[in-house]
Image (tube, rainbow, N blue to C red):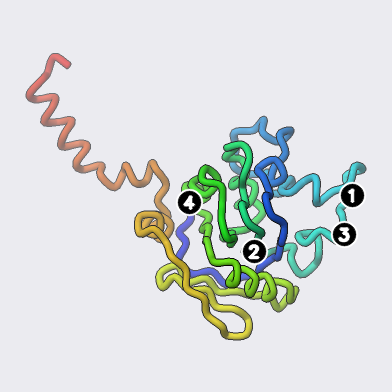
Amino acid sequence: MEKFTKLTGVAAPLPMINIDTDMIIPKQFLKTIKRTGLGKSLFFEMRYDDAGNEVEDFVLNQPAYRKAEILVAGDNFGCGSSREHAPWAILDFGIRCVISTDFADIFYNNCFKNGILAIKLPQEDVDKLMDDAGRGANATLTIDLENQTINGPDGGEISFDMDPFRKHCLMGGLDDIALTMEKADKITAFEEKNKASQPWL
């Protein structure tokens, strides 16, 4: 998992509430177990018309936001089913951070397990960042995870809360397997001790 320490990138505004995981990645794209290749189908039903052509006014199809790395979204982002393909698609598109007033719990947890920083902020702060994101190519935010701050294009700064364990995992690029491997020496020592004391097992 890629480490997350500081990110400076274009922020795309998506001021819709209750964006569920089926809107993020529709069910027809859930056949794969690979984490790559899903970015092109992110927000599929909003990004493309019935003929497969891009919908010009959808934010991620606009030139200024095609390489957005940050998404500022409405309340209750990631609700619906628990599909892990949703954060996979977001990350594969290139988005490393999602900001909202609130997230569905399972989606929120899946973000951190896949290297995406999900930030919860009060409505007034989200409104400010949504306004910043509306500036198109000038909608650049800097997110400093170590100091837990977001700096906007006008120099304003917003602080955010973060669980220390999740922060540790993101900054170290540690998924569940990597966390386990951090204790490899203790695991090996336990296995050797157990084998010596109970060789019949």
Left or right: where 104 falls relative to 171 = right
Q: Amino acid at mark 2?
A: Val
Q: Which residue is mark 4?
A: 112
Q: CA distance from mark 4 to mark 3?
A: 31 Å
Give the number of the disc on residue 56. Answer: 3
- Within 10 Å of disc 3 (Cα), the crowding (few <14, some 14-19, many 20+) is few
- Within 10 Å of disc 2 (Cα), the crowding (few <14, some 14-19, many 20+) is many
- Within 10 Å of disc 4 (Cα), the crowding (few <14, some 14-19, many 20+) is many
- In the rendered image, which quarter contains the C terminus? top left
* Residue 6 point in image, percent of width and height: 49, 69
Q: Nearer the viewer, mark 2 or mark 1?
A: 2
* Residue 101 point in image, percent of width and height: 57, 60
The residue drawn where x is 52% and y is 71% is 143
Q: CA distance from mark 4 to mark 1?
A: 32 Å
Q: CA distance from mark 2 to mark 3?
A: 19 Å
Give the number of the disc on residue 61. Answer: none
SS at circle 1? loop
Q: CA distance from mark 2 to mark 4?
A: 17 Å
Q: Which residue is mark 2?
A: 72
SS at circle 3? loop
Which callout, 2 or 4, points at the residue further toward the start of the chain?
2
